């Protein structure tokens, strides 16, 4: 199979690489994360000018109509630059929900504003008790005439502090862990009834606890059908998982290359430590883990993501394999750098922390291994019957 980029994809890759090289060096990135906001509005505006905010959206709305490969290109480069602007939660995850569930009127109104950078949506789905189960929803939405009143608490909503709008997953019927009965509601982030508790995460990104108290929204704010949101939520989280793994691949490349360069330059007993055979073996193992992660990512983006069973299995295989690569490459990068690898002043520790966060984002290795096994066994039973 030919994995070479098309001419357009090569141009996209070069454009993002050039932007990060010229505008997102390590010192600039460090200055951004030290601000109260933790991101830079000017960078978001430049993303819009470059067309990056329109990559996943159709040309009818002014987007690029990009494929999973196009998103992989952007996210891999963002991983190399350790970009902190909320591209994944806003453009890919929340944007995907709007693109796939929104009515024509909703998409015509909202998508162009996302592409221009004027509006930023985030998706509030996780709760304290839910862990990785997307269907575990306590937040309730009670009908009140032509409106709904929402109450609940959403946890770890990435990018909420930078958002203008929020999409809330709330239960309109069924019990707490029922897949049927989940509905999505859109509203402005500053609406009465929404309180944000913003905080930095361990990888220097920003997240929020979202407290929802008697939030009143009209039925026009519903995204998709009442009670029927779960399947699309799962699909968009799966697609976002592929994007997160693309970011992780960029991070792993930096960790691998930086560690190799360090070992070639760090001298002990008069010679580079890379001359040590044990260290050579370790560097080769890091390279092999990176290449395996890259291969399974390419497999995922070229698979039939429109087939729910294939998509679920592919994403879980990817995430579990990527999680293992993150652990191996990251821990070896820290160890081979010695004490320097643990310092805040050196970039390795920051890349390792972000990679570790991606390792548990949307499900850790154990969760996806279990999911993959269950899906495989289910398919075997179908075949036997």
Image (spheres, rainbow, N blue to C red):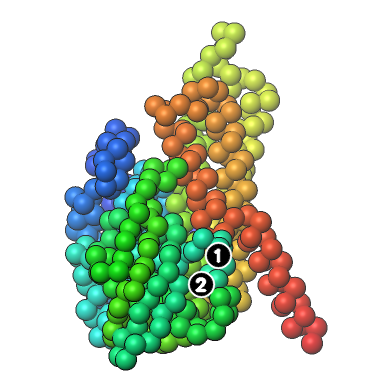
Q: Residues within 10 Å of mark 2 (few under 14, many from 20)?
A: many
Q: CA distance from mark 1 to mark 2?
A: 7 Å
Tag 1 near tag 2, CB within 8 Å? yes
Q: Residue at x 24, y 65 (%)?
A: 190
**Residue 69 visible in the shown view:** no
Mark 1 and mark 2 lie on one chain; the one further toward the N terminus is 1
- Identify the mark at residue 137; answer none if there is no mark: 2
Q: Residues within 10 Å of mark 1 (few under 14, many from 20)?
A: some
Q: Residue at x 44, y 37 (%)?
A: 350
Q: Residue furthest top?
A: 270
On screen, residue 126 above or below 208 = below
Q: Residue furthest front?
A: 214
On screen, residue 46 above or below 300 = above
Badge 1 element: loop
Question: Which residue carries the number 1 mark?
Answer: 130
Q: Residue furthest right?
A: 384
């Amino acid at each position: 199979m030919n994995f070479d980029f098309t001419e357009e994809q090569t141009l996209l890759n070069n454009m993002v690489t050039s932007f990060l090289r010229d505008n997102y060096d390590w010192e600039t990135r460090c200055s951004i994360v030290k601000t109260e906001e933790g991101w830079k509005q000017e960078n978001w505006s430049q993303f819009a000018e470059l067309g990056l905010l329109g990559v996943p959206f159709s040309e009818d709305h002014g987007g690029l109509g990009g494929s999973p490969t196009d998103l992989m290109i952007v996210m891999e480069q963002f991983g190399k630059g350790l970009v902190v602007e909320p591209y994944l939660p806003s453009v890919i995850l929340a944007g995907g929900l709007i693109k796939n569930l929104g009515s024509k009127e909703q998409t015509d109104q909202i998508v162009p504003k996302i592409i221009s950078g004027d509006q930023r949506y985030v998706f509030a789905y996780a709760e304290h008790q839910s862990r990785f189960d997307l269907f575990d929803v306590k937040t309730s939405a009670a009908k009140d005439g032509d409106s709904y009143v929402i109450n609940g608490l959403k946890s770890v909503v990435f990018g909420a502090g930078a958002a203008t709008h929020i999409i809330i997953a709330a239960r309109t019927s069924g019990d707490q862990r029922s897949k049927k009965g989940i509905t999505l509601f859109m509203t402005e982030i500053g609406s009465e009834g929404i309180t944000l508790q913003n905080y930095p995460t361990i990888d220097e990104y920003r997240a929020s606890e979202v407290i929802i108290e008697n939030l009143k929204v009209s039925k026009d704010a519903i995204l998709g059908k009442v009670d029927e949101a779960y399947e699309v939520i799962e699909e968009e989280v799966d697609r976002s998982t592929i994007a997160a793994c693309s970011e992780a691949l960029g991070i792993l490349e930096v960790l691998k290359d930086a560690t190799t360069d360090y070992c070639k330059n760090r001298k002990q007993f008069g010679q580079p430590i890379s001359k040590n055979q044990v260290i050579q073996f370790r560097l080769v193992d890091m390279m092999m883990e990176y290449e395996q992660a890259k291969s399974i990512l390419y497999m995922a983006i070229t698979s039939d993501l429109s087939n729910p069973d294939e998509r679920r299995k592919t994403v879980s295989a990817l995430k579990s394999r990527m999680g293992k690569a993150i652990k191996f490459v990251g821990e070896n990068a820290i160890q081979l750098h010695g004490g320097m690898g643990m310092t805040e002043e050196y970039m390795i520790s920051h890349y390792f922390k972000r990679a570790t966060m991606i390792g548990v984002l949307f499900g850790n290795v154990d969760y996806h291994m279990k999911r993959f096994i269950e899906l495989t066994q289910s398919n075997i039973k179908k075949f036997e019957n």
